[in-house]
Image (tube, rainbow, N blue to C red):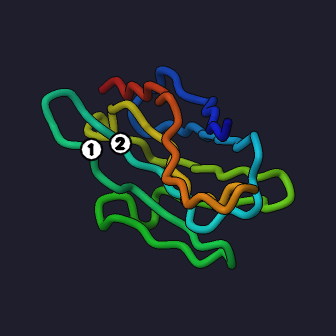
Amino acid sequence: QVQLVESGGGLVQSGGSLRLACAASGSIFTIYNMGWYRQAPGKERELVAEITRGGRPNYVDSVTARFTISRDNAKKSVYLQMNSLKPEDTAVYYCNAHILAEDYRNLKVWGQGTLVTVSS
């Protein structure tokens, strides 16, 4: 069983910061791309940021220069540092990873989601 567990969501005022963390566990051979998605009420889930195994990041335009994605391959973890938060960043944030399991299955795994609420 391969799973992702997120932490770090919560309520913050506009302009504040939060740091999300996501750790993978289970029968994992290697982890390829990892990323963060979000889904606001009434909207589709969208990619926020992703990072390759080698550490190359990619961001959606709306969070560039405010959010930073990073990962620790030894800890099988990915992080999202969110600064200068805006009310429009309010959403459930989901961790995602492309994982090669020890039985060589290619998996796209989702975390359970963590709620980020930014008050104005």
How many residues crowd around disc 1 within 10 Å: few (fewer than 14), some, or many (20 or more)? some
Label 1 sits on a secondary structure element that is: loop
Q: Quadrant of the C terminus?
A: top left
Instruction: Tell me if label 1 and label 2 are in contact, CB under 8 Å.
Output: yes
Residue 68 picture quarter: bottom right
Q: Quadrant of the N terminus?
A: top right
Residue displayed at 47% across by 30% down: 113
Residue 10 at x, y percent in the picture:
51, 22
Instruction: Between residue 96 and residue 55, name the one nearer to us.
Output: 96
Residue 27 at x, y percent in the picture:
77, 46
Q: Mark 1 and mark 2: span between their CA atoms?
A: 5 Å
Residue displayed at 76% across by 52% down: 76
Residue displayed at 29% across by 37% down: 39
Residue displayed at 71% across by 56% down: 103
- Amino acid on which disc 1 is placed: Arg
Q: Which residue is mark 1?
A: 45
- Amino acid on which disc 2 is placed: Arg
Label 2 sits on a secondary structure element that is: strand
Decide if residue 107 is on the left or right side of residue 39: right
Q: Which residue is mark 2?
A: 38
Instruction: Between residue 78 and residue 97, name the one nearer to us.
Output: 97
- Choose the circle earlier in sequence order: 1 or 2: 2
Residue 47 picture quarter: bottom left
